[in-house]
Image (tube, rainbow, N blue to C red):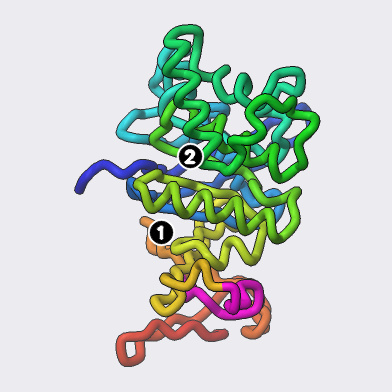
Amino acid sequence: MADAMIQAEGLVKIYKTKETEVLALQGLDLRVEEGELTALIGNSGSGKSTFLNMIGGLDKPSAGSLLVSGRNLFTLSERELVTYKRDTVGFVWQNNARNLLPYLSVLDNIMLPMGFSGGRKKRERALELLERVGLSSKRRSLMNTLSGGEQQRVAIAIALANKPKLLLADEPTGSVDARTADSIFRIFTELNQEGQTILIVTHDVALSKKVRRVVAIRDGKISSERILRERYADRLKESDVSWRLEDTQEEYAVLDKAGRVQIPEEMLRELHLADGRVKLDMEEGRVIISPP
């Protein structure tokens, strides 16, 4: 099997304080192929931001392995990790102040991650990216004169400056209106159609329902995946689709390597279990779960 862009196996992360330990990831497994556009969803505290920070080279697990573009992130030296963060991943933060310097122009902000050599090529690349995100006319503007949506589009251009193999986006539409969110998602889909691998963490229901593959994290593990239904795959640009209301995806529970499945809480409530035991039966190729 060819190398995936992301291959996570058995990731465990424990945060320790003097008083307590927090188990952020509990044996997370995930494979993302090169060229995929994948969304990661989950409640606050589910572990999705911890996982994103690991992929970005900002955090390390307590146990497990993580390969990105064939490189084992947890055996890299500090020098190799700096190169990885510069060349392999681009990061778009929800708080775009982490991407942007307000006292520089838009063009200078985009050129900054490219280093100190190749001035003409840097400028050409920055102008090309500004064209891509629809902000060519703003190249001389200072960042604090732009709207929130324009700043987020500049942040995307900055994340793409060094042609990363993997683009990571943490709540990229979390602080913009619906129209701006649509334009940001359109940039992501166009990039993906050109071969860019993208992983998005989002709470945006409309955005997540447009993505071909949505991975849900619950209690530090992958609990389910949703796949875009065939009939919606070619309708992403249509304005008559109610992306928040329509059932655009098929949901699947994820079976882990130990044969475990997380049962959704609403289904467990329907079983009215007095303890943690359930009865399993096979019936016409189906597994039936019922109370004892």
* The residue stretch that appears in magenta: 239-252
Where residue 224 sits: x, y (%)?
Answer: 50, 65
Q: Is residue 238 magenta?
A: no
Amino acid type at image mark 1: Asp
Give me the residue at 46% from left, 46% from top. 198
User: Mark 2 or 1 closer to N-term?
Assistant: 2
Residue sticking out furthest to the left: 1
Q: Is residue 62 visible?
A: no
Give me the residue at 56% from left, 79% from top. 247
Report, in whole angstroms, how far the alpha carbon at label 2 lies from the one at label 1. 26 Å
148 and 86: which one is in front?
148
Q: Quadrant of the C terminus?
A: bottom right
Label 2: which residue?
167
Graded by Cα atoms within 10 Å as few (under 14), some (14 to 19) or many (20 or more), the crowding at tag 1 reads some
Give me the residue at 42% from left, 79% from top. 231
Q: Give the SS element for disc 2.
A: strand
90 and 142: which one is in front?
142
Graded by Cα atoms within 10 Å as few (under 14), some (14 to 19) or many (20 or more), the crowding at tag 2 reads many
Q: Give the left or right position of residue 172, taking residue 83 as reference.
A: right
- Main SS category, magenta section: loop
Label 1: which residue?
256
Residue 6's tag is none
In the displayed structure, 270 sits above or below 192; it is: below
